[in-house]
Image (cartoon, rainbow, N blue to C red):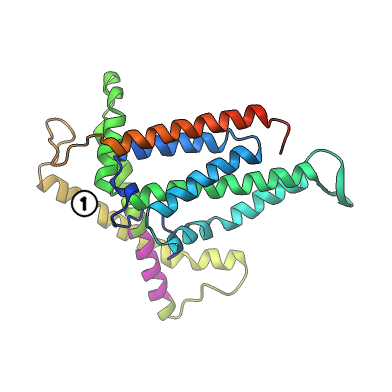
Amino acid sequence: MRDITLGQYFPTDSLIHRLDPRIKIILLITYIVLIFVTFNFFALGLVAIAVLTVVLMSKVPLKLYLKSLKVIIIIVIITSLLNLFYGTGDPIFQWHFIKVTLNGIYNAIFVCVRIVLLLLMSSALTFTTSPTDLTDALERLMKPLKIFHIKVHEISMMMTIALRFVPTLLEETDKIMAAQKARGADMESGNFIHRIKALVPVLIPLFVSAFRRAYELAVAMECRCYQGGEGRTRMKQLTLSKRDYIALVISGALIAGIVLCNIFFVNIR
């Protein structure tokens, strides 16, 4: 549970922290699209360099990023193996129905790198953006949806609260598991079915704790006269600065570089 870093914010003074949260969300969406429109190693290498640059400039300890990767390592391995054994082309190794091709190796590497880059970039957003700034940025970006009478503020508030409470619930789960083990509960031995049944004494207190926290949060918001986004003012106004425009220009140059790589290196893997 301690290895799950989703929703955690690491406060420090870095250039990535000082970027406007709206720009960071836009750049994240842009990089996610770029990750999946790379068709050769040259284009994928450009995206990897950009992501690693952001990770280093964020001044967030690398161990936090490694923890976020540790959570999905099984998914990465399974996905890579599926692409490795189901590639097309002439086999370079074959044993019964198991066939490994050069195209399958390329696809396995592509999928593995793409998932890792995707998670690193997503983690960089939550590590460098506080929940309050994330709420304001989401609300500003979704503001055009108000034309369709969509409650943008409430939606962004719910998304941010859900993201914020992920580390809290994980910490609560860790405490409950430790308490149950201290009472003699066995959660590590036996087959898969036995381990699933052993989680029942953990899930019930966790649900009770989650509903209690939700009720306390609702009461606290009601006591502070929270009525949604209508008529609300902000203590901190979001304004774009010179570094935000520079970040957009760099991202535009990255997009152009990837497009050129896809055009001129189309037959090179």
**Residue at screen point 29% across, 39% down:** 20
Question: Quarter-wise, where is residue 136 in the image?
Answer: top left
Q: Is residue 50 above or below residue 138?
A: below
**Residue at screen point 55% across, 41% down:** 46
**Residue at screen point 10% across, 48% down:** 223
Residue that extends furthest to the top in the rendered view of this protein: 147
Magenta run includes residue 97: no
Magenta run includes residue 175: yes
Which residue type does callout 1 highlight? Leu
Q: How many marks?
A: 1
Q: Is residue 61 left or right of residue 87?
A: left
In percent of width and height, residue 238 lies at 22, 36
In percent of width and height, residue 230 lies at 15, 30
Give whichever of 78, 31 is nearer the camera. Answer: 31
Let me know if residue 240 appears in the view.
yes
User: Quarter of the image containing the C terminus?
Assistant: top right
Let me know if residue 155 appears in the view.
no
Give whichever of 191, 236 is nearer the camera. Answer: 236
How would you rate the neighbour count of disc 1 (Cα within 10 Å): few for under 14, some for 14-19, many for 20 or more?
Answer: few
Q: Main secondary structure of the magenta part?
A: helix
Q: Which residue is mark 1?
A: 217
Q: Is residue 140 left or right of residue 105?
A: left
In percent of width and height, residue 191 lies at 62, 69
In percent of width and height, residue 14 lies at 32, 52
Helix, strand or loop at mark 1 = helix
Q: Magenta residues, as a range?
A: 168-180
Question: Quarter-wise, where is residue 19 in the image?
Answer: top left
